[in-house]
Image: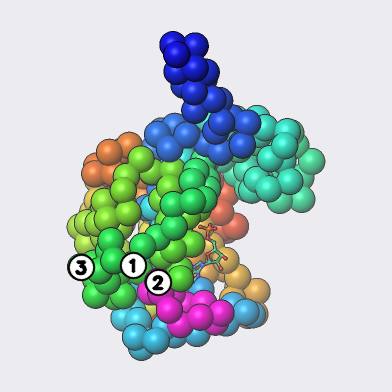
Amino acid sequence: MATMKLAAIAVALLLPLVAGVASADEFDFFYLVQQWPGSFCDTQKGCCFPDTGKPAPEFGIHGLWPNYAKCRPAEPELVDDVEMVVDGVPAIGRHHRRQKCWPEYCNDGNQLNPWEIKDLVAELDSHWPTLSCKSGRSMEFWSYEWKKHGTCSGMDQHGYFAAALELKKRHSLAAILADAGIVPSDEESYFLSSIRDAIADATGAVPNLECNRDAFGETQLFQVYQCVDRAGKKLVDCQLPMQGMCRDRAKLPVF
Ligand code: AMP
């Protein structure tokens, strides 16, 4: 009997390793990733508005992502699936050793149940809208983010979405930037250092910034990564460098 129990425990402990899934509580900090909708839409691909209508001209949540402080070698059987980042910098097109810098898909059986978050839906609709043209249903975006990142957060479904909303509502990035004279414009461009400093001064924590290119190839501010402690509560300085496709200046297109 005791042997059987021991064997069951051993299987339970080893299964995640054999299946190549990361353990839910194995990460160092979160990124709260917020996105400027103008920069998501203003690319060659374009965007579509959600069923709930055009979102406000405010940064929207992309996700709350558990992350490692130091990248690790990827397990060989996962190599084809992992997203490539070397030293915190996306390494697309570079031939480095494969690394894994965050856990993902920690429990594929744990699908988002809309009932679990029904009291949050109204707020999620305004703060975490989809802009995908595949579907106007933001729930599909939340389900994807839950499956990929949320299942690794150590939080339950309600806790995960409530934590992201709570963090997001603490500061309005658009208002912070506007106070620093950084306002949406289709002509103006702004120093990345001014954007970073404005957010750091107002929130007390240095963020990372990611840019993309508009349909004419011009650099625009795409996403702001705020670092959050493991509990999902306190903003902390982002320590990992992020190249993030930025140059010294970027646009903030009108939305
Ligand atoms: P992730 O895999 O969590 O890094 O998210 C990347 C995926 O999310 C890509 O497929 C993007 O197209 C999608 N995505 C990013 N922003 C949005 C958005 N606002 N609405 C819907 N999908 C998005």
Q: Which of the numbered marks, if any, corresponds to residue 114?
A: 1
The extreme right residue here reads 95
Q: Which of the numbered marks, if any, corresponds to residue 139?
A: 2
Q: How many marks?
A: 3
Question: In this picture, which residue range is highlighted in magenta?
Answer: 129-139
Residue flagged by tag 2: what amino acid is it?
Met
Q: Earlier in the sequence, mark 3 or mark 2?
A: 3
The extreme front residue here reads 1
Image quarter of the C terminus: bottom left
Q: CA distance from mark 2 to mark 1?
A: 8 Å
- Most foreground residue, 127 or 122: 122
Residue flagged by tag 1: what amino acid is it?
Pro
Q: Earlier in the sequence, mark 1 or mark 3?
A: 1
Q: Secondary structure at mark 2?
A: helix
Which percent across, then down, holds residue 183? Answer: 34, 75
Is label 1 or label 3 in front? 1
Which percent across, then down, holds residue 185? Answer: 42, 80
